[in-house]
Image (cartoon, rainbow, N blue to C red):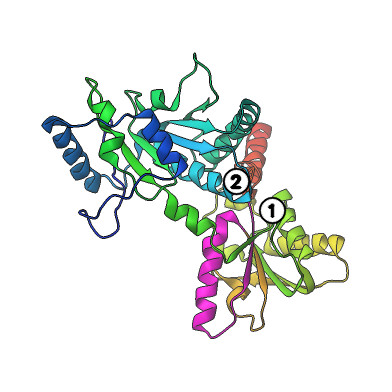
Amino acid sequence: MSRKVMKLSAVAGGANAPVAPLGAASVLAVVAGVAAVVGASALHKRRAAAATAAAAASDAAQVAVGLLRVHVPQNFRDLVKNDVLVEKAVESVARSLVIFVAGRDKHEIVNYTSELYSLVWDVACLQGKPLLDIRIVSGFADAHARSWGDLVLLPELNAVFGEDALVDVQRLNAQRFERDGLFAVTYHPLAMHIERRLSPEFKYFENEHTDLTPHDVVILGGTFDHLHNGHKKLLSLAVSICARRIVVGVTADKMLVHKSHAALIEPLARRQQSVRDYVAFLKPHVALEVVTIEDPFGPAITIPEPAAIVVSTETVAGATKINTIRVERALPKVHIFVCRRTESSTLSSSYIRERLAAAASTARS
């Protein structure tokens, strides 16, 4: 039997810190679906205390069934926020994830729900969870459809995920405690992850307010095995903000021996030539330097002059680490340009090698 109580949100200042008032949209929605119960019984208090105690022991465990509320994105920040909410919820749920979509009107809710099925499937496959049960509920007014309040009371529910850093968990569980057989659910705050992804140091290409003025030197790195559209996207974006020189680091063969189907990885020389050919096609007169990467950071921590670096949302943490190292070496920070990673489960060299391996196996049989 899976745990019913997994983790309570961390409160800055210790266990006795006061609980902040519910203010953000997702928390208001929880409260709207769960009426506060005045004068909770001693049994309810003991349940809440037990939930708190169990949380410390199960912080790293996955929940069986989770509930996530998202809003139809109205701007770029909303889009990135939803990326993070979905990624972290999928990462934390073992069996079933229910997503409630809120929005301004039925049309935008239905359209985004359709897009969300593809997005969540892609994230689940990327995380090795193709069998994760994804259920998306459109939150428009319908007397016969499930509401957010109905979902909060699902008997099998273990945890609620949201963007708010602090939630009154006892209040969240008040109505569940009134029903026989319902255990406490826990709240998993994802605000910290959202803040990291939306750090001011990240300049997103998709954000219409990003300054795309060209930089003299632009850096990017990768494996570039079986050059595919994901690689071409990064190279194209790098070219778009380059005024003079592009430095592309290509991972050495010795660093790829533990990759899936490593025997099918193209030799270093071929991968480097693919990069040269594509950049030359895009911008023939740009100065291109293709180097071999033999450590996790490549040329990004040694180039002395100011530069920009192009990464995807998958590798933003590495870019942050690069700037930390550059500061330690008294080098100027690089400007971090980021593109959202989409179609991640199939737009990858690993997927191509898997298909090649499968084709070879079929040919032999």
Is 233 rendered above or below residue 343? below
Picture residue at 64% right of the left edge, 54% below the top = 265
232 and 8: which is toward the camera: 8
283 and 335: which is toward the camera: 335
- The picture places residue 92, in percent across and down from the top left corner, at 40, 41
Between disc 1 and disc 2, whose residue precedes? 2
The amino acid on which the numbered mark 2 sits, given as a three-letter code, is Leu
Q: Residue furthest front?
A: 38
Residue count near mark 1 (Cα–Cα under 10 Å), binned few <14, some 14–19, many ≥20: few
- The picture places residue 158, in percent across and down from the top left corner, at 32, 33
Is 219 rendered above or below residue 233? below
Cβ–Cβ under 8 Å for marks 1 and 2: yes
> Does 212 lie within the magenta span?
no
Q: Residue furthest bottom?
A: 330
- For the record, the magenta segment spans 312-340
Check disc 1 and report its element: helix, strand or loop.
Answer: loop
143 and 189: which is toward the camera: 143
Q: Is residue 90 left or right of residue 339?
A: left
Is 154 rendered above or below residue 346? above
Picture residue at 41% right of the left edge, 45% below the top = 23
Residue position for label 1: 206
Picture residue at 21% right of the left edge, 31% below the top = 38
- The picture places residue 34, in percent across and down from the top left corner, at 34, 29
Picture residue at 60% right of the left edge, 46% below the top = 79
Residue position for label 2: 79
Q: Quadrant of residue 13?
A: bottom left
Q: Residues under labels 1 and 2: Cα distance? A: 10 Å
Which quadrant does the C terminus fall into? top right
Which quadrant does the N terminus fall into? top left
Residue count near mark 2 (Cα–Cα under 10 Å), binned few <14, some 14–19, many ≥20: some
The amino acid on which the numbered mark 1 sits, given as a three-letter code, is Glu
